[in-house]
Image (cartoon, helix red, strand yellow):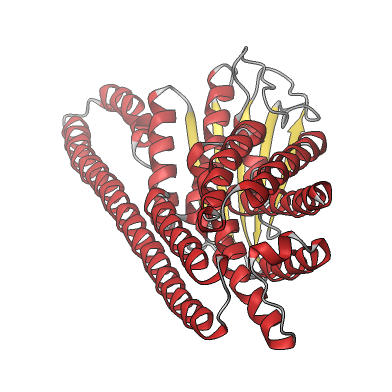
Amino acid sequence: MLIQLMVVNTLFAMITGYLVHYFLKTNFNIRSAKTRLVVFIICFGISNGLLSTLCMKYLPGNLQFLKSFFLLILSIIVIKYLLKISIVRALLSFCTIMLAVMLCNFFAPLVFAFFSNVNVTPDVITNDVFLFAVMNALVYFFTSIIILLTPFAKKLGQFKNLKPVIILLFITLLMLVLNAGVHYIVSFDPISFTATLILSLIYLIVSVWYINNFYKYEMKIEEEKQQAFYNESLSLVIQDLRRFKHDQANHLTVISAMLKMKKFDQANSYISEIFNTTESIVDTSVCDIKNAGLFGLISSKMDYAKKTGIKFSLQAIGEIDSIPNVKISELCEIIGIYLDNAIEAAAISGDKEVEMRLENKEESIDIVIDNSCSIIPNLESIRQDGYSTKGTNRGHGLSIVDKILSKYASISNIINFDNKSMIFTQILKIKKGI
């Protein structure tokens, strides 16, 4: 009997392990090699199955709620070290899955009470492996629906600060565990159990409402930061334009005086000296970028490139405002990595040029970045994590980009290299219709 219980517990713990990995992949783009994933699911299943079975068999009925806390500690350790993620993400993933499991644990006894006269307490199902397996199958059927299909479980990873969310989820989970201990462990009364379930659902709904509003608050703060960055960058552009206008007025005055004095050679020499000063002015094409995040990022990269002696030219065709189907923070991360790589490569090339073009088309927004190169890149290896022509402990940028892009079916990425002109090109095409 003990072995049979352990087999059932291990099987459903493995399902829990898979749901944990799915949650992490959906919310944080955590992807593991097939071998690592299989090892994780097996280790998670066996360790949790063994501990759960021992707790069910040897813990007194009024202490069964302690099983959840023992499993929490063990699971966090296994998730953190086998999947190599932070303790915060491990906690969030496990608490979310267990919250769904505990919620469904309330429904299962009610279903049995409705269709039969079986008093499905832990003591009963511990001695009836078939009933225990059926109960777990029902619980995990509804749990899988919650995790795989509801938007709630797919939105948690978007929060900037996960700690308040984890605390709230943990309190909700604790409440469900304690309520189950009071209304389910010793005996099963459908009326009090239903009342407890309704109260727990109300608390859960309030929690979801709070989390959703917390998310909106974070997005508002992020938008305000982007707007402040936009205003600051725009202010710098305006200052440069005013300085340029003032300087040009002075130059024209000097040239006019030289011409009046018929010092044509000096005037010609003076014109030659100031001819290239217009290149120091910020490219006004950046003003066509109305998206605050992109405006701030691109203008700062342009300024950095010019300070390092690189000619950075920008062309914006059509206004670039809202970017559909993509988080602006992640798009800025991608563009930032592309521009950093382009500037680094151009800095050691002969031409020292970076060109960027943004075009708002009817069906897509295209972003193209060209840079001069001195080294022919290996296009087959360039996206591998750790690959770099600049030495060790480098080359992680494009692998990060690939992880972000894997979340978006609406974005396509093309890499080209022209051997004759020694120009490397990155192209992003963001479709509007998906």
- Residue at 48 percent across and 63 percent down: it is 319
- Residue at 72 percent across and 79 percent down: it is 118
- Residue at 74 percent across and 68 percent down: it is 135
Viewer can see residue 428: no
Q: Is residue 361 left or right of residue 216?
A: right
Residue 113 position within the rendered picture, expressed as x and y whole percent measured from the top left:
67, 83
- Kindly indicate the quadrant of the structure image that contains residue 326: bottom right
Front in this rendered view, residue 205 or 60: 60
Which residue is situated farthest in the top direction here?
391
Q: Is residue 42 left or right of residue 59?
A: right
Q: Is residue 286 left or right of residue 21?
A: left
Mark count: 0
Residue 9 position within the rendered picture, expressed as x and y whole percent measured from the top left:
75, 52
Viewer can see residue 80: yes
- Residue at 45 percent across and 58 percent down: it is 174
Residue 111 position within the rendered picture, expressed as x and y whole percent measured from the top left:
69, 81
Which quadrant is home to the C terminus?
bottom right
Q: Is residue 351 above or below residue 361?
A: above
Q: Is residue 263 above or below residue 89?
A: above
Front in this rendered view, residue 334 or 28: 28
Residue 89 position within the rendered picture, expressed as x and y whole percent measured from the top left:
53, 44
Front in this rendered view, residue 142 or 238: 142
Front in this rendered view, residue 326 or 242: 326
Q: Is residue 34 left or right of residue 75?
A: right
